[in-house]
Amino acid sequence: MAVRLRAVAVLGVLLAVGSMGCSAKKKGAAAGAAGGGVGEEGLAAGSSLERYKQGTLGTGEEGPLKDIHFAFDSAELDEQARGILRDDASWLKDHSKAKVEIEGHCDERGTVEYNLALGTKRAGAAKEYVVALGISADRLTTISYGEELPLCHEHNEECWQKNRRAHFVILGE
Amino acid sequence: MRRMWWTLLVISLVMAGVRASDAQVRGTIFGPGARSYPVAVSPLRNLSESGAAANFGTQFADIVSADLNLSGFFKLLDRAAYIEKPETSGYTADGINFDNWSVIGALALVKGAYSVSGDNVTAEVRLFDVYQRRQLAGVRYHGPLGELRRMANKFADEIMKQFTGERGPFDTRFAFVSTRDGKFKELYVMSPDGGDLQQVTTTQTINVSPSWSPDSHLLLYTSYKRGNPDLYVADLASGRDVLISSRPGLNLGGRFSPDGSKIALTIEDKGNADIAVVDRGGNLLRRVTDSWAIDVSPSWSPDGRRLAFTSNRSGAPQIYIVGVDGGEPRRVTFSGTYNTSPAWSPKGDWIAYVSRADGGFNLFIVKVDGGDTRQLTQAAGNNEDPSWAPDGRYIVFSSSRTGREKLFVTDLTGASQVQLTRGGGDDSSPAWSRWLE
């Protein structure tokens, strides 16, 4: 059930983005004006999977909620990640109707299936921390894309570090 | 997969007497990866008056040659060196001048003939021992011309049986995912010789982890086509595609039990991956693991009573074995800090897996009791996704040793590693079917 609801929510956002085209910007700007600079990013930011389909993955994802990063084969939150999550939680407190999908991602090294499980763990760790900071769990869904949707395609640590991330997608408010 | 209606008759052959597998060649001249046994595979002679299906005989020889090349046992002799021309020479022991074959170094010889009637073909193919000047095996195939590939793969299996005592693994299919036609991993199937490629999915989304049903008719795979990583089964013959498991979160790496009645998969519980067994309709039969750690990638023992899987419960991913009915998992791998992707041999003796070693990821096999670890690939790109041939003597895997990921087949020593796919895109997650009938 939760899956279906989430799918509908994502689809809703995608349809909005896809069908509105240029007008999305206008509407976003209007929403932004009313909602304190939120609307435009929220509407424009699709899931990483949708962005990959559109050829826009890695460009302009930066919304009000920042990515966090992980060490290889780890879902532990370091101090930097926790700091970012505290900022994210405070944004979510200020935008109490916003719902968010947290995506877990991995670098290319290792096994596809294991990395899908590790991505689940990363998204779950981020969710758990944000919930501990007082954000209702039912505003947060998670999904793992494992190593399937890298932001960066070179085979070096600099690139891998960017790809080992939890990414926040605002589904709607 | 379409049911075969063509018939296969083992003709008169294996002319009484000693089989090659009893002869001196077995175990002496032959060693895995030795590529020591010189064989000539002559194009089949066309007996039809008309020029219909003029390429059949050459294609048959090409496929048999590709299969034998994968086996690592044979040295395929260059066709340009053949003295006897297929269109004019005999194809039975009486009609062959064996001196023409021994002089070019052949110890084994494949010859045959075919005739076409409408859309059907009848082919007689024979395997000869050149030195002893006698037939070792002969098979008559009759069926649609479109079944060329299966006939040739079956004959390659027969050759393997004659020389090694065990049927070869070529009358089978590979499933794999590839980005050859776009940016998404789509599902494909192909013949072990590399031919007969078919695209199974055109979903334009992420598809991972294909695996076969025991009857080789169905493919389980995980797809994001509805947004969540759900488990589907594709029926290759009908094109039907059915959702099996769509639990929130992961529905990953489904594997049919050896009797086909159940499916082991990875599901998600409280943000963590665990192993479960469901029926063919996706209904939960039992949770096999329930730990805080990542448990993923189940692989059935051949008797269907145990599962090998990957778990990071020790702090890093290692291979474990657990009874399907639960119990305390037993750790199998103790060397290396990153061991994943267990694949239980159909013979039951080995578990293949991937280990982070030598600066990359490499293929290993280990005995089920944890002993006798062997490294099959060495520091040539990343070597991953092992899947066993039904005869338990070969493993197909993906490797980035040439740049992009491509499929390779190795024997159990690593001495023979043959590249199977080429071209653009990445090919990965191969799954070797059982024999087709």
Image (cartoon, coloured by chain):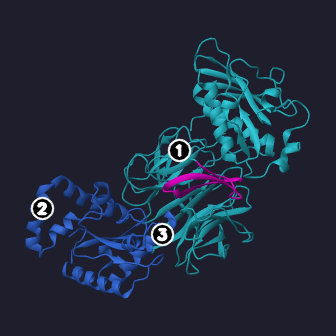
Say what amino acid the circle numbered 2 marks. Answer: Lys
Residue B327, horizontal then vertical, whole percent:
66, 74
The residue pinned by badge 3 equals: A117
Q: Which chain is in blue here?
A: A
| Res. B288 in view | no
The residue pinned by badge 1 equals: B189
| Left or right relative to A17: residue B292 | right
Most common secondary structure along the magenta stretch: strand
The chain ID associated with circle 3 is: A
The residue segment tinted magenta is B392-419
Residue under the point 55% across and 57% down: B399
The C terminus of chain B lies in quadrant:
top right
Q: CA distance from mark 2 to mark 1?
A: 44 Å
Say what amino acid the circle numbered 1 marks. Answer: Val
The residue pinned by badge 2 equals: A25
Q: How dense is the environment of label 2, judged by Cα within 10 Å: few (below 14), some, or many (20 and up)?
A: some
Quarter of the view holding residue B321: bottom right
| Res. A35 in view | yes
Which element carries disc 3, helix, strand or loop?
helix
Specify the colour of chain B: cyan
Q: Is residue B411 magenta?
A: yes
Say what amino acid the circle numbered 3 marks. Answer: Ala
The N terminus of chain B lies in quadrant:
top right
Residue B250, horizontal then vertical, whole percent:
46, 65
Q: CA distance from mark 1 to mark 3?
A: 26 Å
Which of B258/A26 is in front? Answer: A26
Which of B239/B79 is in front? Answer: B79
